[in-house]
Image: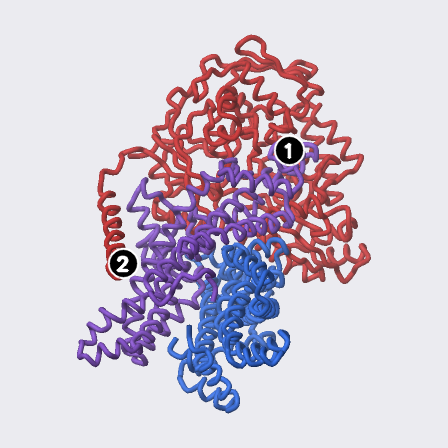
Chain colours: A purple, B red, C blue
Amino acid sequence: MGRYLLRRLLLMAPTVVLVTFLVFLLLYLSPGDPVLMLVPMDELDQLTDAEMDRLRARLGLDRPVPLQYADWLLDVLRGDLGRSIHQRRPVVDLLAARFPVTLELALLSVFLASAVAIPIGVYSAVRPGGVGDVAGNVAALAGVSAPNFWVALLLIVVFAVHLRWLPAGGFVRIGDDPVAHVERMILPVVTLGTALMAVTMRLTRSSMLETLNEDYIRTARSKGLSQRRVILAHALKNALIPVVTTIGLQIGRILGGTVAIELIFSFPGMGKLMLDAIFARDFPVVQGAVLLITISFMLINLVVDFTYALIDPRIRFQGAPRS
Amino acid sequence: MFERKQTKLMMLTLLALALTLTGSLGAQDAMTEFVVGIGETVVSLDMSVPSPSLAHKQVSYAIYDPLLRLGTDGSINPALATDWAISDDGMTVTLNLRDDVSFHDGSPFDAAAVVWNIEGGMDPEFGGGAVNDFGRIESVVALGEHAVQINMTQPDNNILLALAANDSRALMMSPTAYETLGADEFAFNPSGTGPFKLESWEPGVELTLVPNENYWGERTGNADRAVFRVILDASAATLNYQSGDIQVFFAIQAGELPLLETVAGTVSGGVARGVVALALNLHAPPFDNIHNRRAVAHAIDVEPVIHLVYGGLAQAARGITPPNSAAFSDEAPPQRARDLDAARAELAAAGNPDGFSFEVSVVAQPYRVQTLEIFQANLAEVGIDLVIQANERARHIAALREDPSIAQAGFVQILRASNIPEGYLNAFAGCQSTNVMIGYCVDEYEALRLDLPGIFDAEARIAQVRQMNELAFRDMIVVPYVYPEIPYVYRGDIIENFALTGYGLLDWTNFTVAG
Amino acid sequence: MRPAGESRAAFQSEARAGLPLFFERLFRRPLPRVAFALLLIIVLAALFAPWISPYDPIKPDFSAARQGPSLEHALGTDDIGRDMLSRILVGARVSLLAAFIPLSISVCLGLPLGLLSGLVKGWTDDVIMRCLDALLAFPRIILIIAIAGLLGPSLTNALIAIGIAGIAPLARLTRGLTLSASEEDYVLAARALGSSNARIMLAHILPNITAAIIVTVSLDIGGVILAEATLSFLGLGIQPPNPSWGSMVAVGNRYLQTAPWISLAPGTAIFLTVMSVNLLGDGLRDALDPYLRNR
């Protein structure tokens, strides 16, 4: 098991390096100059090439590109993520301010989704083909099919514009005003939760169905145990294993997928940070953010795999994690 | 086993939520604060980094002071400098400084600090965009502890305005703090002499200023805190204003104004701020031909732009000098009206009677794209095919500067509220411009342009600017289409003594917040 | 993990039974029928959009901007007075393109890559897998935005970017299927008989994994349409004045209070389309692969 863990961790390294190199390449090849992004539009025309070169040298952007990447990588290995070209702050500070926002969004929406979806999924599985099942299935499909930016706008129109129950956006730190913080979290969390709910519900249902057909459940039933007891005590426990796996993976996925929501709700999270940085050609920030998200994503995967293996005795650690 | 774990987790989360909710029942602080909504993220508060946005200028102007201040009537008033004099030949400027001022970090404001700041402004690397303003300064020397002398290479009638600017190195930073902290740290721990100082700053969220208790000037306002909250989405911003979360809202989208005005106690207004024009690439077909430029000018319809994009808060432009400039004239150039026959005649004269096709690069902002879509429909009526290329900003700039093949046209928006007669000309033309699109370089015009800074007589200066303006119109170097107003709203029932600076920014030193 | 042979056999026997049985299975339940009908309407609307649109979708009527739904304009007008219904009809074409182009790119590149990786093993497999892992670990929408940014904003480039981002997941799925298929008896037998890798791949493995691939791809259609809509929403997709549902929603975002139909109508169109594609994909899965039923 230790060796398996080690192998997995070692395998992460080339992937992470590859990801950062890919980001660097994509940004470098895109037209646009980070230096020009620092200058207001109406003063751009007065900036001479010599001035630009000086500014570029000051920011360390005058060196050959491969060297810039190598320097960055070496600095990262030394624990230094560098400084934002555009905002001048250390990238670490920016990430420290933004990551918790996105993480909170991700965790709360996964929590909400699970709390709603798992009971519905179990219910559908117990009475497959029933009205509740079909309704749940359609609702789940609806959840997957609705674009999250549209759900967000819909929620704003209903709850912020018409009912005036909740604010339409903006972000308040929990330390500044906890009530305002919670109020502003609700709509984005519901938006993100909607799509997750659907996936979780469908998975719970199918996993539960499968489990209910297993021999030991049939045995339990034939022994005369009540339906309720069978479901809650035996089936649910096993059926939830793949569900938990998926939930874990979803957290990882949401971390990098909240751009549109953050834009609509004016949330200062990772998505907005990355989008702005891509548009400003702010290499160090994009690199740092992608690095953080990629590593979180992979670590979550690793943890999920381990939990999976710990819970399910049928899965054993193998030298090779494939197949 | 798993179930139990999950239950525990669930309990913990619920507990956390409960704690959060009860914690907030604690006393709300009884501070008098007002919250300003800003639509852009403020970046660096180091004045040696060029200022990228209006919100940025707004915050900078509260933290820092210039030597001189521009009044709303265009007058130059004392600020950190008490009085000043320009020698008869225009070659030296002397300024006497206040002796009772210190920076937020406690270090004294003196002649050495002024020399440090102005020299920084003359250095392209640290000029923060002031290099042009300070372009004719040869040297700056301290005359004792509280006076400086600026020596010029050539006379510059704009030198006082340059020292009264609302951004870059005209604003005095603390040399001590700058050198102790280093440029990178100073950028978010700024130290100036202004009425407010930075208390906290969460990038992308909000920036809080508190009064500078050692402020040298007069401050009658009672606000304990001024919060600048970033709300990027226009709808969200409007809703936040409606709900009372923000009380001042500047530089809003004009279309939102009617909604905002329905909020009780709201006072609204607009600051005339310059001119918006369509810039055409004069160096390549089709716009190297003046008839094609004129055809575009005749074919576009400004009325729907004024109503749909600016919500009525704009005037049709007649030239590149807007009404808030001293050189504005309502006689020349003549007011244009949409004239499709004239447009067709110009097309025929250009040798392409059936029209042509051209591409416009635009930063993908909704109101810009909307304007172009209107023009697109207008121009289609005479056979001109306008292709919109909505780009992100980096690519747009690349199109304007590096690769003119990407687009044949773009926007120029000159947003300056000051009434300097020629404030608008340099941005549109000049042989030194690195903008491939609007590098209008004609001897006749260039001679007038270079000669202008030496003219100190106000009448003569205005006359010369008008002459240049007419040349620009004759050659149709850009197609100006509106003089916009930047609308603002504030809660008049909460904020009293609302005022604007000479630059049309909020002057909230005297804001009084009603209990 | 699952007895793949069973499902393959079932699939093959079904394939022999022919298309009628397949359609019978597909439309036995009402939901796929409704979805199919809805999708048919959308496809027809897209195809005949220029002829059935009540107005020119790109010609504005400035005096009629931001009007609510009425008899003249069934879904109202947009920010500069264009008919929303006409724009939504024409926008349907973009969404259909958005479904086909990216998926074709993903399949054409991802499928061979996955087959190769699954069959060759060894260091080729390792290299391919590491690259795929990198692409998979990369936040998907950020990858798409970065590629679209590199290529420049246009509908085609947006679709290419979405397609490229879809290669890795598909290659990974194909690899997994290939790996498990190559353990099957008939493949082992073919190998024992001395068949070449290429022959095994084309004659034995490919036909047996097709069903699973089709099902997965059909369930991806919705996601791909949403990706285009998101890109256009962010301003990286279609160029004005041409309408895409995503870009229409983005425009309407500014008028949520005064003219909510500008964003809600195209948003609903996206929703209904993706919903029916997903419903049909669900039915397709049930009909194609009996083993997967109930999943």
Whole-percent x, y for residue C159 in the image: 59, 64
Q: Could you tell me the amino acid type at mark 1?
A: Ala
Q: Nearer the viewer, residue B498 or A61?
A: A61
Instruction: Classify mark 2: helix, strand or loop.
Output: helix
Q: Work out whether residue B492 or residue C272 is closer to the camera in this orientation and state it.
A: C272
| CB atoms of marks 1 and 2 within 8 Å | no
Residue type, label 2: Gln
Residue B301 lies, in percent from the top left, at 63, 54
The local crowd at label 2, few if under 14, some if 14 to 19, many if 20 or more residues have their Cα within 10 Å, is few
Reading the image, the residue beneath label 2 is B6
In this rendering, do the residues under marks 1 and 2 share a single chain? no
Identify the residue at horizontal 39%, vertical 46% (top origin).
A100
Place residue C268 in its image quadrant: bottom left
Q: Which residue is mark 1?
A: A57
Residue B283 shows in the view: yes
Whether residue C106 is visible: no
Q: Quadrant of the N terminus of chain B?
A: bottom left
Specify the farthest residue to the top.
Answer: B144
| Label 1 crowd (10 A; few <14 / some 14-19 / many >=20) | some
Q: Specify the label residue B513 is tagged with.
A: none
Q: Which chain contains the residue that carries disc 1?
A: A
